[in-house]
Image: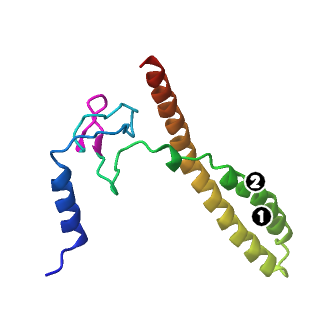
Amino acid sequence: MALSSYELERIADDMYKDRVITGWAYCGNCGYNLHSLPYIYTCPECGNQYNARPLKMKGIFVLHDTYFPASDIAATLLCAPVVYLLITGGVNPTEYGQLILGAAMGVIMLTFAHKACRQLPRFFKARSIARRIALEEKEE
């Protein structure tokens, strides 16, 4: 009898249910230090549900997961003038290929812009949590 991935996750969560976090883990919402709290619980400061079980790490602050989307912003800024030139030059009815290429580049540009706009708030939130953690560590 094979177990499904859901059943394996549930068994693993049950194994860690009564254990407490011995290392340093921080809430992914407010940056609260979760040291000595259960692996699966809610943050006492903000109420964020977390799972600090190894290989799961849901609701836990991990600094290396957040990055400034410089490459996505640069790609958007580089694609924008190309899209403009292709589309404005492609209005000529005989140059449909140029218009189609401009539309395709426009979709690519919007994809990069969307990805950058989704990552920026995460980056700034992670930065504020990292500052809070650094201030708390200085006080200790």
| Position of residue 127 measured from the top left corner of the image (x, y, whole percent) | 54, 35
Is 3 on the left or on the right of 25, as rendered?
A: left
The residue closer to the viewer here, 140 or 98, is: 140
Is residue 34 highlighted in magenta?
Answer: no
Q: Residues within 10 Å of mark 1 (few under 14, many from 20)?
A: many
Is 11 on the left or on the right of 67, as rendered?
A: left
**Front position among marks 2 and 1:** 2
| Position of residue 52 measured from the top left corner of the image (x, y, whole percent) | 30, 47
The residue closer to the viewer here, 140 or 26, is: 140
| Position of residue 17 measured from the top left corner of the image (x, y, whole percent) | 17, 48
Is 78 on the left or on the right of 118, as rendered?
A: right
Mark sitting earlier along the chain (2/1): 2
Vertical order, 132 against 81 (above or below): above
Is residue 45 highlighted in magenta?
Answer: yes
Q: Which residues are magenta?
A: 40-50
Task: Label 1: state its secondary structure.
Answer: helix
The residue closer to the viewer here, 42 or 137, is: 137
Which quadrant holds the C terminus?
A: top left
Vertical order, 95 against 56 (above or below): below
Which residue in the structure is indicated by mark 1?
A: 83
- Amino acid, disc 2: Leu
- CA distance separating discs 2 and 1: 10 Å
Vertical order, 1 against 111 (above or below): below
Q: How many marks?
A: 2
Which residue is found at the position 18% from the left and 79% from the top? 2
Which residue is found at the position 64% from the left and 59% from the top? 112
Rendering quarter of residue 76: bottom right
Which residue in the structure is indicated by mark 2?
A: 77
State how the image is colored. Answer: rainbow
